[in-house]
Image (cartoon, grey):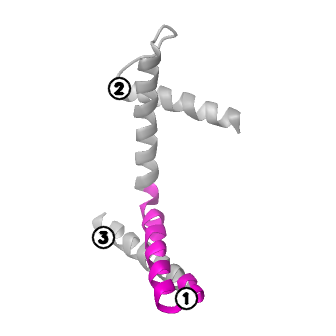
Amino acid sequence: LARGVAQTGKEAVERGAVLRGHFPTPQDSPMEQALDWAVGCEADLNDYVRHNKARIAGHGGAIAGGAVGFMVGGPIAAVVGALVAFKVTEGTVKQIEEAGE
């Protein structure tokens, strides 16, 4: 786990440096490395959201559907409401994405 986190951090620094047009050297200050890391992480997050926005929206819909279901019918309705809202929201976002392409 620690090795994977370290590798991911290193890749984020490298990607951030490329995006900033900066070529890292061992003499870089910790501030420059932190900036490269932040830019690389932001780019990775942007890619993740772009490719998974339907799932992310579905989870948000599931939270809302579960809350409404719980208020209306209790714990079983909360589960049903969450599942239905997840599928509806995810499907809607996928259709909007396909229409926009």
Q: Give the residues in magenta.
A: 51-79
Gap in Å between the C-alphas at discs 2 and 3?
33 Å
Q: Which mark is residue 20?
A: 2
Q: Amino acid at mark 1?
A: Gly
Q: Amino acid at mark 3?
A: Ala
Name the image quarter holding residue 99. bottom left
Task: Please state which of residues 67 and 26 is positioned toward the viewer in this rendering.
Answer: 67
User: Is residue 87 in view from this perspective?
Assistant: no
* Disc 1, SS: loop
Q: Amino acid at mark 2?
A: Arg
Tag in front: 3 or 1? 1
Q: Earlier in the sequence, mark 2 or mark 1?
A: 2
Gap in Å between the C-alphas at discs 3 and 1?
37 Å
Circle 3: is it few (<14), some (14-19), or many (20+) Cα within 10 Å? few
Q: Earlier in the sequence, mark 2 or mark 3?
A: 2
Gap in Å between the C-alphas at discs 2 and 1?
52 Å
* Disc 2, SS: helix
Question: Which residue corresponds to mark 3?
Answer: 99
Question: Which residue corresponds to mark 1?
Answer: 74
Q: Which mark is residue 52?
A: none
Main SS, magenta region, reads helix
